[in-house]
Image: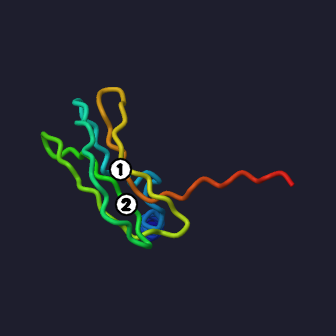
Amino acid sequence: MTKIILAASLGLLLAGALLPASANAADKSLIVVEQAPPLARHERAPKPRRGYVWVEGYWTFRGKHYAWQKGRWVLARPGYEYQQARWVKVPGGWELRQGGWRRPPEAPLQPQ
């Protein structure tokens, strides 16, 4: 009986390891701050680079103060669009929504 319980427990443990991580795995870097971020800096984007997307600079929060994260070019991903990082007012403060690649919503079908 003990062997059956041990085998079942091991099976459940292994099955859990195969499950995908939380759908909100990106939320690990969630930042909420009471003080509003400073106004965005105006950065002059360097000359466009073929096959790359410009990621705008933004304020991030490090410890007890805001720090400017410079803009940069990142390699384009076919079939995706880049959503820029942004601060959003939420109850209790301001939340940094990290930028990243997202699949664009499906275009609605056009009537024929």
x and y percent of residue 109 in the render?
A: 76, 53
Quadrant for residue 50, please give it. bottom left
The secondary element bearing badge 1 is classed as loop
Image coordinates for residue 90, horizontal then vertical, percent = 36, 30
Seen as rendered, the residue at the extreme top is 91
Q: Which numbered disc covers residue 36?
A: none
Residue type of the residue flagged with mark 1:
Gln
Which residue is depicted at the point 41% across and 69% down? 52
Q: Of label 1 and label 2, which has the lower sequence position?
A: 2
* Horizontal arrangement in the rendering, residue 112 relative to residue 89 (left or right): right
Name the quadrant of the C terminus.
bottom right
Dot 1 alpha-carbon crowd within 10 angstroms: few under 14, some 14 to 19, many 20 or more: some
Q: Which residue is rendered at x = 17% and y = 42% of the image? A: 66
- The alpha-carbon separation of the residues under discs 1 and 2 comes to 15 Å
Instruction: Identify the residue under disc 2.
Output: 54
Query: Percent from the top left, x then y, of residue 18?
Result: 46, 68
Q: Nearer the viewer, residue 39 or 103?
A: 39
How crowded is the residue under tag 2: few (<14 C-alpha within 10 Å), some, or many (20+)? Answer: some
Identify which residue is drawn at 39% across, 51% down.
84
Which residue is found at the position 52% from the left and 63% from the top?
80
Mark identifier at residue 98 = 1
40 w.r.t. 76: above or below? above
Left or right: 70, with 14 as reference point: left
Q: Give the residue type that dot 2 points to.
A: Trp
- The number of discs equals 2
| Cβ–Cβ under 8 Å for marks 1 and 2 | no
